[in-house]
Amino acid sequence: MTPITEVEGRRLALSNLEKVLYPETGFTKGEVLHYYATVAEVLLPHLRDRAVSFLRYPDGPDGQVFFTKNVPPGTPEWVTTAEVPRSEGPARMVLVQDLASLMWAANLVTEFHTPQWVVGAPGEADRLVFDLDPGAPATVVECCEVALWLRDRLAADGIEAFAKTSGAKGLHLLAAVRGASSEEVSAYAKGVAVEAERVMPRLVVHRMTRSLRAGKVFVDWSQNAARKTTATVYTLRARGEPFVSAPVGWGEVAGCGDGEGMAFRAGEVVDRVREFGDLMSPLLDRGRAGRLP
């Protein structure tokens, strides 16, 4: 029988809690739900008011993995939804605004992906993002070197960047911005990526072409497009182990060494949140948002 639990006055049916979702470590669905409940206080502010795309993996990362953008069938009526602009026409999507909605969504077994804008102002980007993806034999070590250059380059324009692991191979850089459209932020980000390649031609590539990426870091600026999303900070990833897209301090980036310390599993992230709080919280302070030059 599916257990029923109550979260903030909402009744939820949480299913298959003993199901192993990460076979390499035996991490279960129940542990996934426990992780999200534990980090909800720091995760929810980064999800709030953003249309969520779900990358679902209900049978684990080795099973079927698929995106769900529209409101899933069976979504409770108390889960907030909003109509958002999409290239193929307006669509209704889920907003994860509270703990009950987070636990309902986590029960679907999903990564959380969000755009760089909020539903109240879809025409204005409030985030800038770079996805640093290493092409073998490059690793997160090279990503750290590129991230430090990008941090300083953005700072020269009055934009304060913060870093997180992708939860896979690379790093994400995010910054709060204001007063610009997604198109304007994309153009700016592309210009910075092109400049990075010019300054570090042996280390950086700004184009997605696979044949160009061996041994280099692809500085993906394209996720600033209004139609694109990025893995949300604190989301679990559909990987062999329960790795998380986790915030890191710039001291950690500068001292990443061989990169072994730049991958964090769910339990480690819980410990880091207890010790450091939310290292990404400055993104939520609109007073610190920068303007594009």
Image (cartoon, rainbow, N blue to C red):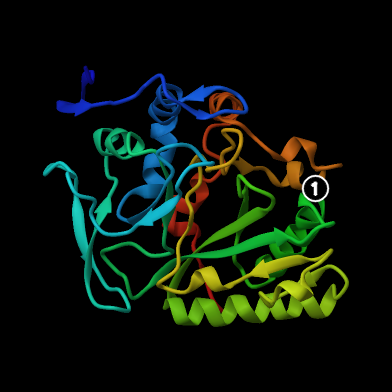
Q: Position of residue 37 (x, y in %)?
A: 38, 27
Q: Which residue is mark 1?
A: 254
Name the side, left or right, on which 174 lies relative to 14.
right
Q: Quadrant of the N terminus?
A: top left
Vertical order, 103 against 125 (above or below): above
Q: Quadrant of the C terminus?
A: bottom right
10 Å crowding of disc 1: few (<14), some (14-19), many (20+): few
Residue 252 placement: quadrant: top right
Q: Residue at x 31, y 33 (%)?
A: 103
Q: Residue at x 80, y 58 (%)?
A: 136
Residue 219 placement: quadrant: bottom right
Q: Position of residue 211 (x, y in %)?
A: 77, 75
Q: Position of residue 117 (x, y in %)?
A: 38, 65
Vertical order, 289 against 11 (above or below): below
Q: Position of residue 287 (x, y in %)?
A: 45, 58
Residue type, label 1? Ala
Along the line of sight, the residue nearer the viewer: 212 or 245: 212
